[in-house]
């Protein structure tokens, strides 16, 4: 499923409801319009990608079943954090990386997690690992296969099904063979479907485009 094909898929109302709910949190936290627009843009990309992945991935549909509010919230958080990683990559291309930028990055991570009532240090560490993987694949590969496999595992986990023992994973993963040999995989069936992997890969730019569209459409005149 490509982004253009995904345009025909309507957003599940439960993801729209999550967007409204988290947007209210953003409004309550930030008096500044630009900050509100930035985080709502991440959220718009996150809900769009969550919708695309749950609609297009056969194993996610099998594992998740009917998407309830708790699952939708966890999935939207997962992909909103991915949109934050994408935003970081764009910023890195514009400005040299320095200590101040790193502090801002961690601050933004904490903000996004707090929007979803998550303030655990473990979640911050988890984001850093996935962000390192995202950066590595953009730099070293012309595909996002490894990232897609990890995102599938995270999506399954958001629905209550564990596929990977994360404590056994060393980031960044440079080959799927290294992941397999680490004995970290608990359930391979849910994360090795070629079509599901392709759906996730194609959904990343789709979510990013939704993020950009929201940001541009809500520019103050």
Image (cartoon, grey):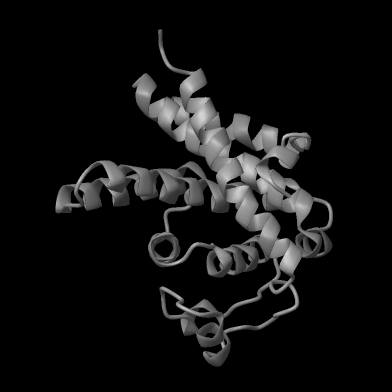
Residue 116 appears in view: yes
Query: Up-down: is 64 above or below 153?
Result: above
Residue 46 appears in view: no
Across and down, in percent, residue 184 comes to 56, 85
Across and down, in percent, residue 57 comes to 76, 58
Q: Residue at x 78, y 37 (%)?
A: 9
Query: Up-down: is 4 above or below 153?
Result: above
Picture mark count: 0
Q: Nearer the viewer, residue 26 or 170?
A: 170
Q: Residue at x 53, y 83 (%)?
A: 179
Q: Residue at x 70, y 46 (%)?
A: 52
Q: Is residue 143 left or right of residue 89?
A: right
Across and down, in percent, residue 183 comes to 57, 90
Q: Nearer the viewer, residue 21 or 98?
A: 98
Q: Residue at x 36, y 23 (%)?
A: 34
Snapshot quadrant of residue 193: bottom right
Q: Nearer the viewer, residue 2 or 191?
A: 2
Query: Up-down: is 106 above or below 136?
Result: above
The furthest residue to the left:
99
Which corner quadrant holds the C terminus? top left
Across and down, in percent, residue 77 comes to 55, 49
Snapshot quadrant of residue 17: top right
């Amino acid at each position: 499923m490509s982004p253009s094909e995904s345009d025909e898929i309507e957003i599940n109302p439960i993801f729209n409801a999550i967007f409204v709910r988290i947007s209210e949190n953003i409004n309550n936290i930030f008096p500044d319009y630009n900050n509100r627009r930035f985080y709502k843009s991440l959220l718009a990309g996150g809900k769009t990608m969550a919708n695309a992945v749950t609609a297009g991935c056969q194993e996610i549909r099998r594992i998740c079943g009917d998407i309830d509010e708790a699952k939708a919230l966890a999935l939207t958080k997962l992909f909103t954090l991915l949109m934050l990683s994408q935003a970081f990559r764009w910023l890195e291309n514009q400005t040299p990386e320095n200590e101040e930028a790193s502090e801002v990055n961690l601050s933004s991570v904490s903000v996004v997690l707090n929007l979803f009532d998550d303030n655990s240090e473990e979640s911050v560490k988890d984001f850093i690992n996935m962000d390192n993987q995202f950066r590595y694949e953009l730099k070293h590969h012309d595909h996002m296969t490894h990232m897609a496999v990890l995102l599938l595992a995270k999506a399954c986990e958001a629905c209550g099904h564990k596929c990977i023992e994360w404590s056994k994973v060393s980031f960044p993963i440079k080959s799927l063979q290294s992941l397999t040999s680490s004995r970290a995989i608990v359930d391979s069936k849910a994360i090795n479907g070629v079509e599901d992997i392709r759906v996730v890969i194609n959904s990343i730019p789709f979510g990013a485009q939704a993020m950009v569209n929201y940001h541009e459409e809500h520019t103050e005149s």
